[in-house]
Amino acid sequence: MKKILVTGGAGFLGAHLCERLLAADAEVTCLDNYFTGNPRNIAALQSSNRFRVVEQSVVEPFDGEFDEIYNLACPASPVHYQMDPVYTFETSILGTINILRLAERTGAKVLQASTSEVYGDPHVHPQPETYWGNVNTIGIRSCYDEGKRGAETCLYDYQRSRGVNVRVARIFNTYGPGMHPEDGRVVSNFIIQALKGEDITIYGDGGQTRSFCYRDDLIEAMIRLMNAPDHVSFPVNIGNPGEFTILELAEIVLEETGSRSKLVNMPLPEDDPMQRCPDISRAKEYLDWEPQVPLREGLRRTIDYFRKVI
Ligand code: NAD
Ligand code: UDP
């Protein structure tokens, strides 16, 4: 039976990952300090005797014997990661170093939840993994972007100099059931605003683009990446290449909810990337993966979820 550690396992993606790993008969330890996660997300998993929860920050050293570690601990919504930027940076860098030390000692394989934010406001479109990115080192998003970039550096230095087996998933905007109603990211904001009949808050003119991946597609790719042969240790983009403007997203949410909410424009946050779309050639070639759930279908499932929780 595989022993697996999931840091950030009580968050939106982490909880679903824990569920999938338990369903595949693994023994799963969830390490989380509930900064943005919630015990409710993992309550149903507690009935399994193969599931263990450790309430702790990934920044503190942690011991145990594991075959695999999925390192997801880090606030992911701009609203959350900008609340305490020093905390975010420490979580990314010190947390990843802790995990790598544990992996070096135990021989565990590490998969890092990296991000499309390593590409910043990209000048290359769509973004292949070979693009080095365009990131402001000192802006309000830098704690997250540079934290994740620095974490990638740590992973490959530990791989080259200390033989740790690493995997890097560069995750593009992912949404789905299980998102926190106060998450603050665009999909949850728009759905909740639409369901409550409140104004839909379009930041800027809404012409900026994002590519939205459904949660289950993303988790499937992460598990495939962890289990891919050892030569697949380079970064792999995971996302849905369907690209939409934020205005288009708002219109689809209005259609799918049947809401009559009005669209209102708000100021565009500093350093907000203008376009984002993954080149998923590597995921297709090495993981035999591509997303299965189109945006409208994923939104319908997410709208059903939010109808129940708000
Ligand atoms: P989330 O905020 O729901 O989950 C993050 C989890 O990490 C939470 O349970 C939180 O409590 C925990 N956490 C935060 N700081 C911690 C610390 N110091 N120690 C232990 N636990 C800590 O976000 P999510 O969307 O589930 O994202 C999970 C991971 O995937 C993050 O690393 C994020 O950067 C990455 N990612 C997500 C997306 C996305 O669109 N969802 C995109 C790119 C990357
Ligand atoms: N956004 C928006 N209204 C909102 C929340 C976000 O217009 O209520 C925009 C935001 O400015 C960005 C895009 O939607 O251009 C995606 O934002 P999100 O916070 O979901 O993630 P990001 O990709 O910026 O990390």
Image (spheres, helix red, strand yellow):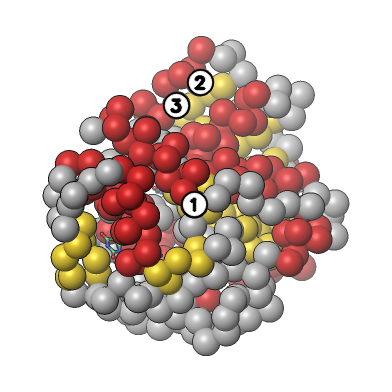
Question: On the rendering, which quadrant does ligand 2 occupy?
Answer: bottom left
Residue 303 at what x, y percent from top left? 36, 39
Please state if 195 lies on the left or on the right of 217 as rendered: left
Separation of residues labelled 3 and 1 (CA atoms): 26 Å
Residue kind at label 3, given as amino acid type: Ile
Residue at the spot x=29%, y=32% of the render? Answer: 307
Earlier residue among tags 1 and 2: 2
Residue kind at label 2, given as amino acid type: Leu
Q: Is residue 267 above or below residue 300?
A: below
Q: Which of the 4 quarters of the picture holds residue 238?
A: bottom right
- Some atom of ligand 1 lies within 8 Å of the CB belonging to the residue at label 3: no
Q: Is residue 58 visible?
A: no
For label 1, the residue is: 295
Q: Which of the 4 quarters of the picture holds residue 227?
A: top right
Please identify, in this view, whether the residue under mark 3 or under mark 1 is nearer the observer.
1
Indicate which disc residue 113 carries. Answer: none
Q: Is residue 277 visible?
A: yes
Image marks 1 and 2: residues in contact by CB distance under 8 Å: no
Residue at the spot x=63%, y=81% of the render? Answer: 131
Residue kind at label 1, given as amino acid type: Leu
Image marks 3 and 2: residues in contact by CB distance under 8 Å: yes
Q: Is residue 114 above or below residue 219?
A: below
For label 3, the residue is: 42
Q: Secondary structure at mark 2?
A: helix
Q: Secondary structure at mark 1?
A: helix
Indicate which disc residue 45 carries. Answer: 2
**Residue at the bottom extreme of this rendering:** 123
| The one of 177 and 191 positioned closer to us in this rendering | 191
